[in-house]
Amino acid sequence: MTPNQILASRLNNLSESQTLAMTRKSRELQAQGRDIINLSIGEPDYDTPEFIKEAAKTAIDQNFTHYPPVPGYQDLRLAVSQKFKRDNQIDYSPEQIVVSTGAKQSIANAVLALINPLDEVIVPVPYWVSYIEIIKLAEGIPVFVKAGIEANFKITPQQLEEAITPKTKMMIFSTPCNPSGSVYNRQELEALARVIERHPQIYVISDEIYEHINFVGQHQSLAQFKAISDRVITINGVSKGFAMTGWRIGFMGAPLWIAKACEKMQGQITSGTCTIAQKAAMAAVLASPDVTQDMRDGFLRRRNLVLELLKDIQGLKTNVPQGAFYVFPDIRSYFGKTDGKAIIKNAADLCMYLLENANLALVSGDAFGDDNCIRISYATSDEKLTEAIKRLKTALSQLH
């Protein structure tokens, strides 16, 4: 028997994260001496703020080195509860908060706690890569609702209504969005909430991990709308806004019965997450959101730099992302072109062409459900971004 015949079908049905795969490939080529510029990874290049690191050091000195409660330390859950009220106008008690090893685990907990085989889950396109694989693990059925660049990658209430069937149990989406950088404003969320209100069987995972990287003002949360707040699971964390990706802290606010279900599941898989990271995260969420301003301003400057440089590349179509740190250009005009060796049939072909010929690592849009686009992360220095777009322009000019 082959390994694939021996492995559980759930694993064989699971796809590798394309963002992590491209990052791994980039590191392998760098190890071979190739000068790769990696714009495939979704990670701030900033360092964790000093006051957060000091909180972690203090936690070590105070011997927070024993098993924590499964859903997180009570004082951290209280801090997250206060953060939701202060920043998002959402009322979650500490008992409704579950702290996990990253927002990805929070999402997986919620999906696995609610989705039965053949339940339908509405997923606006483009979507973050792991949503679909987590739904597949739960044996649910993803139902895609596409919003292209012309709509700033945001679905309409009518599209949502048309996607709902008697089998629909959940919707999952992000704002600000990975990969598009799109941000739903209050009016847009309220219109979606009115649709959800009419269908009481539907629960919503609102992934707000990029909350602090928002270029258009106050972040808006779906759970603020009281008519559906008892059916919204709000996902957040400290990875993106506080440059704490390696600390692995995410959290959810959810109806109490869902929070208890996720705690039960987490207790059998990972138990409570790292004690030191929890104490560092408490310092982050208790701090004024103003501490993230400099990093947000830096990302805004980089976004503007990248958009300005991309203007000089004929055939790329861009919109103006309003958050996160990605540009998601439409590259359909290059389909069918060739450099005499490779023929570009889709976004994946273009990404491999750029990796081989421009030493530039990007992620194909098919990883996010939209094969017309590629994702460019601008979470790196101005110098690297300038050189990367120069390489992109040169490589694309060789295609005819």
Image (cartoon, helix red, strand yellow):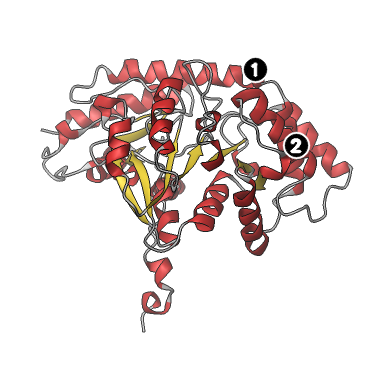
* Quadrant of image for the C terminus: top left
Q: CA distance from mark 1 to mark 2?
A: 20 Å
Name the residue beneath numbered marker 1.
290
Q: Is residue 278 above or below residue 323?
A: below
Query: Residue extending furthest right?
Result: 62
Q: Nearer the viewer, residue 86 or 10?
A: 86
Bin the neighbour count of mark 1 within 10 Å (Cα to Cα): few under 14, some 14-19, many 20 and up: few
Vertical arrangement, residue 120 with respect to residue 349, above or below:
below
Vertical placement of 66 versus 299: above or below?
Answer: below
Amino acid marked by disc 2: Leu
Residue drawn at 52 percent across, 31 percent down = 210
- Answer with the quarter of the image where residue 239 lies: top right
Q: Return the residue nearer the eye: 378 or 99.
A: 99
- The residue that disc 2 covers is 78
Pick whichever, 38 or 51, lies toward us: 51
**The N terminus lies in quadrant:** bottom left
